[in-house]
Amino acid sequence: MKLDNKEFFKLSFLYTAVAAFPPILNLFVRPLIEGEGKLAPADFSRIEITETIITLVFITATLAMTNAIARFYYDFQDDTRGSDKLISSIFNSILIRGVFILIIAFFLRKYIGQIFSQPELQDFSRYGFAAIFIGISRAIYMTAFALFRNEKKVRMFLLLSLLVGILRTAFQLIGVFYFEMSFVGYVNGTLIGSGIVSIFILVYVYRRTGFHYDTSIMKPVNQFAIPLFQYAFIAWGISYADRYFLESAPVVLGIYSQVLNLGRGMEIILQGLQGASQPEMFALMKDGISKNIDDIKKLSHLLMAQTQTIIALAIIPAMLYCSIFNTELKKASELISIFFIVYLLRTQYIIFSFPVYFEKKTKFFLYLNLVVLAVNLLLLYLLIPLWQAYGAIAALLCSQTMQVIGTYLYQKKIVPISWNLKKVMLFPFIIIGTTIALEILKLRNGFNPFIISGIVVFAIFASLWFLYKNEIGKYLAKAWR
């Protein structure tokens, strides 16, 4: 098969636009619920801790089934009966794990609250079970979205994605203003909004596939997924441990949470791009890696270039957005460029991991990320007392750089692909290094954050022009004709 550029850009645009919808709605929610007599930075720190719990539940309930359904779809796409059993079994496995999580949390609820220093977080029952149900709901709809992407059911994907954004946002506002003006109201609103969509998905799936749990099908699925779950659990530690280290400083964590919130929006948008790329990538690999090597590399270059473009376009607007807040949240603008640049590493990791996923060599991620987690925790322990939020970002940059390099070396060993390293490795690292150097200059000399971020944006676009000037020139000449 050949890469259809028109189809790829169409799907890429659709998935990115839909993925951007919930974060855009959230941009309107935060200013409405923040300020005097409303939520303060400390409240947002508690929302961030709740998000940490939600993500852990999501990872555990899913057990990497989002990746599994995306990969095993290609093994069953010509077998309708087998495909129905696969899909139904995967969703049933999510629900079974969700029930076990709820039971364990019920018996450990007093002990879970004791790990936090803030009194509002110590009563786990007030918010914890709602967070667990949100995590289970997220596992359901994210797995469904992965299935719809691979089945090319674009309308269903669009409809349900938009519903998640609209209902979750609407009920968050209702929860805060009409239930309780605190993070508890926000969490309960999120539960209702996301829960409605998840129930609809389950009804749709079971009406289509029937109700099955086929152990013969699930055995290879679990063998594929368990190493990815172990990786995801460790990655959760890498990505979320900083919240725990900052939890005892609620205002600092509240400011940092605003950066993380914008970062989650960025991540969701990039997941939309990756969601468009993954089916195309796996289809090319199934047709033959060596035969389609040029298109595989081309698709990877497109994904990297799109990531750089989105980051460059987002930095200044995100900083301007932070300036509209009335509390200390406005200080988040100073952290935007150095934090957003982390997503270059995320995309590099995705590109190098595609061949590893396709070859089902997933045990590697466990060993790599155990080392990465250990380094991350050590750096957090050492750097956060010194640099607070900057210490968390420094630890993240270091640990994810290790993750990228390790994945690249392993992928090169099992699937030898001669990447254009200028495009997927060298220049992204140059941009990261430039951003770090500029951030240090800003802190030492008190430079205006907007000037420094403007230089970062210019550097990103300059690198894109240098790397893709021939492609851009051909496109502009074609458009001119």
Image (cartoon, rainbow, N blue to C red):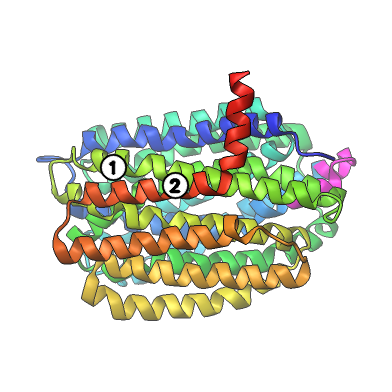
Task: Examine the residues drawn in magenta and state their main secondary structure.
Answer: helix
Q: Is residue 78 found inside the magenta-colored segment of the image?
A: yes
Q: In the drawing, does residue 280 fall left or right of residue 170?
A: right
Q: Earlier in the sequence, mark 1 or mark 2?
A: 1
Magenta residues (range): 71-83
For the residue pair 47 and 301, the one nearer the viewer reads as 301
The label on residue 462 is: 2
Q: Residue at x 34, y 64 (%)?
A: 436
Going 40% across and 64% down the picture, which residue do you hit?
A: 433
Q: Position of residue 202 (x, y in %)?
A: 63, 38
The tally of labels here is: 2
Given residues 4 and 222, the one toward you in this image is 4
Residue 105 percent across, percent down from the top left: 45, 63
- The x, y position of residue 283, in whole percent, is 79, 45
Q: Where residue 185 is drawn, which disc sits there?
A: 1
- Per the image, label 2 sits on a secondary structure element best described as helix
